[in-house]
Image (cartoon, rainbow, N blue to C red):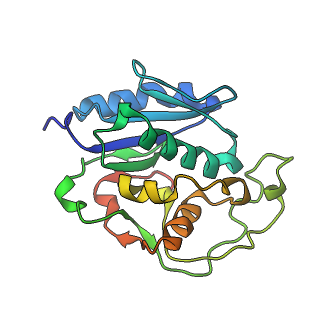
Amino acid sequence: MNNNNSTILYIFFTHKLNFNNVYTKIKTMMSNLNNKNYIIIKGIDLESYYDKDEQVLNINCNDKYEGLPEKVLKTFQYIVNNIEFNNYNYFFKLDDDMIINKLINENDIKNYNYCGKVNINYNGNRKWHIGKCSKNSKFNTMEYKGNYIPWCLGGYGYIISRNAINLIKNNINYKENIYEDLYISLLLNENNMKPIHINIQNYVISPDH
């Protein structure tokens, strides 16, 4: 099925050091699915810009592990504020190693603003990030001290609507958060928007999960 008129944009997040390892793989996978509705995200030290020919969005942000909350929120800000992406109503956040095995039917998510594999555990692993961050990052040795609420697990991918992004796009506290997926849920929760559980593994395979 040709989905080139889809209103769902698949967003693959990578970083500069891994970009060359995943770029061709992602392009080939999406080509095999006959779907051109995707972009690849990596961080840069310059002003953010979109390379339309390569379908690569370069975001001015910390490109390390601890910078993922900044990278994701700035990506969401960019896409809802840029006319290049006006046709999209939903955005599927994905890691660079994820495998799409089935395209999403828009009718299955049309009533949802934020959905994925929801973790309802209020006591998540507060040390998950330790040792993964840059050595000079305050988070590299510091446990997460913030709140836990139900959130869509980023390691499985999640879907967020344009309406939801518009509620949170102006937040600038990304540098005070370490868990990108939980951060997004906390912001949406402040706007009375809760995560909806769907069987997201019907659509995407995450090798690490």
Residue 51 locus on image (x, y percent): 46, 21
**Residue 153 position within the rendered picture, expressed as x and y whole percent measured from the top left:** 49, 64
Where 190 sits versus 2, above or below?
Answer: below
Q: In the image, is 181 to the left or to the right of 195?
A: right
The residue closer to the viewer here, 29 or 137, is 137
Q: Is residue 67 left or right of residue 31?
A: right
Picture residue at 47% right of the left edge, 27% below the top: 56
Q: Is residue 209 visible?
A: no
Q: Is residue 88 left or right of residue 16?
A: left
**Is 59 left or right of 116, judged from the image as shown?**
right
User: Residue at the spot x=62%, y=80% of the render?
Assistant: 123
Of all residues, the one furthest to the top in this rendering is: 53
Image quarter in which the N terminus is found: top left
Q: Is residue 84 visible?
A: yes
Q: Quadrant of residue 112?
A: bottom left
Nearer to the camera, 31 or 11: 11
Provide residue 134's location: percent of width, then percent of height: 79, 46
Q: Residue at x 70, y 59 (%)?
A: 129
Q: Please, which residue is most extreme toward the right here? A: 136
| Quarter where residue 163 is shown | bottom left
Q: Residue 142: where, in percent of width, then height?
A: 82, 64
Total number of numbered discs in the rendering: 0
Residue 202 falls in image quadrant: bottom left
Whether 91 is drawn above or below 180: the answer is above
